Amino acid sequence: MEFDNDLDALGLLCPLPVLKARKRLAGLKAGQVLRMQADDPAAIIDVPHFCIESGHELIATQSAATHQIYFIRKK
């Protein structure tokens, strides 16, 4: 999947992955896509909730061997 910016949140615990995603998305234009990699177990719940609350679109989630990958389109 294509993306415009990449965020490595591996090793970060709640709430840091979502806080870093919010900051990174602030620098993107509407419609651009952020790819975020995270291994925090809480991210599975936090990232979709963050997208719903902020109006961004979670367009895909993928599972890798040791982490999850989220694709978020900025509102």
Image (spheres, rainbow, N blue to C red):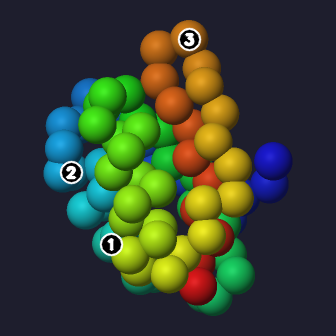
Please, is residue 49 above or below residue 16 in the view?
A: below
Find residue 23 and name its label.
1
Mark pair 1, 2: CA separation = 10 Å
Q: Tell which tag, 3 or 1, sits nearer the viewer.
A: 3
Q: Which residue is mark 3?
A: 65
Total numbered badges shown on the rendered structure: 3
Find residue 72 and name its label.
none
Please, is residue 28 above or below residue 36 in the view?
A: below
Which amino acid type corresponds to the residue marked 1 in the rendered image?
Answer: Lys
Q: Which residue is mark 2?
A: 16
The quadrant the C terminus occupies is bottom right
Q: Is residue 37 left or right of residue 40?
A: right
Say whether residue 48 is visible. Answer: yes
10, 71: nearer the viewer: 71
SS of the residue at dot 3?
Answer: loop
Q: Residue at x 51, y 31 (%)?
A: 68
Which amino acid type corresponds to the residue marked 2 in the rendered image?
Answer: Leu
Q: Quadrant of residue 20?
A: bottom left
Q: Is residue 41 left or right of residue 16?
A: right
SS of the residue at dot 2?
Answer: helix
Residue 7: x and y in percent read 46, 50
Q: Residue at x 19, y 37 (%)?
A: 13
* N-term mark: 3 or 2: 2
Mark pair 3, 1: CA separation = 27 Å
* N-term mark: 1 or 2: 2
Which amino acid type corresponds to the residue marked 3 in the rendered image?
Answer: Ala
